[in-house]
Amino acid sequence: MKSHCVQLGLLPRRAAVYALVAIVPLAAYSQEASTSEAHGIVVANMDRSVKPGDDFYRYANGDWIKRTEIPPDRSEIGVFDSLIDLRQKRIAALIEEAGKANAPAGSNTRKIADLYYSYMDEAAIETKGLAALRPRLDAIAAIRDKHAQSKKVRRMKAAAVQGINIRPEALAQSPRQCPRPMPNSK
């Protein structure tokens, strides 16, 4: 009988690292005691002046819509935005904690802190400029025809780890999202 489980050892090494980085913060908070938040239907959000048969969406959410203001830095607001915000705060707290821990070199805590501080060191980033990206930019600049473009796009897609920590509105700006290959003009 074949196993349908994917063994971690069979995944590309980089994909395994990305998956672990995405999962570690969640594992740390999964052991917290649950809070006494209310779950399920919130009657206070319902607009009982609307008949459910006329507009069920307004009936179920009408009062919430009336009293909820969309923040100016967002295009929408909802329960998933609240969950994303909570996740971001928790991850930031873990990173800050790792930075203050003064952990031994080579430990996971130290690696997290070092990675964070490397992103925050704007002076070093500006000094290095595009040097780290130069080989990739040169490879893109070397594309001369549709066949070469298609080949490069396939390689980029094969190398990308997709679906980890990507918000839908970020997909349009994601460096992982590659244009479709141009059709052959034969």
Image: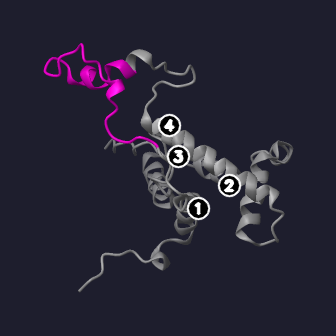
Q: Residue sitting at 48 percent across and 24 percent down?
A: 75
SS under mark 3 = loop
Query: Residue 106, how many percent across, how many down?
Result: 77, 72
Image side of residue 110 versus residue 49, left or right: right
CB under 8 Å between callouts 3 and 4? no
The residue under the point 56% across, 43% down is: 86
Front: mark 3 or 1: 1
Which quarter of the figure is the N terminus placed in? bottom left
Q: Could you tell which of marks 2 and 3 lies nearer the N-terminus? A: 2
Q: Position of residue 169 (x, y in %)?
A: 47, 35
Could one spot residue 170 in this view of the protein? no
Residue 74, placed above or below residue 40: above
Q: CA distance from mark 4 to mark 2?
A: 18 Å
Instruction: Residue type at mark 2: give it.
Output: Leu
Taking depth in this image into account, of 177 and 75 the one nearest to the observer is 75
Mark positioned earlier in the residue sequence (3 or 4): 4
Please name the residue that numbered disc 4 is placed on: 82
Who's the residue at 52% across and 46% down the image? 144
The residue where tag 3 is placed is 144
Q: Residues within 10 Å of mark 1 (few under 14, many from 20)?
A: few
Residues at marks 2 and 1, CA–CA distance in whole angstroms: 9 Å
Q: Residue at x 79, y 56 (%)?
A: 99
Whether pointer 2 and pointer 1 mark residues with C-beta atoms closer than 8 Å, the reply is yes
The residue to which callout 2 is attached is 94
At mark 4, the secondary structure is helix
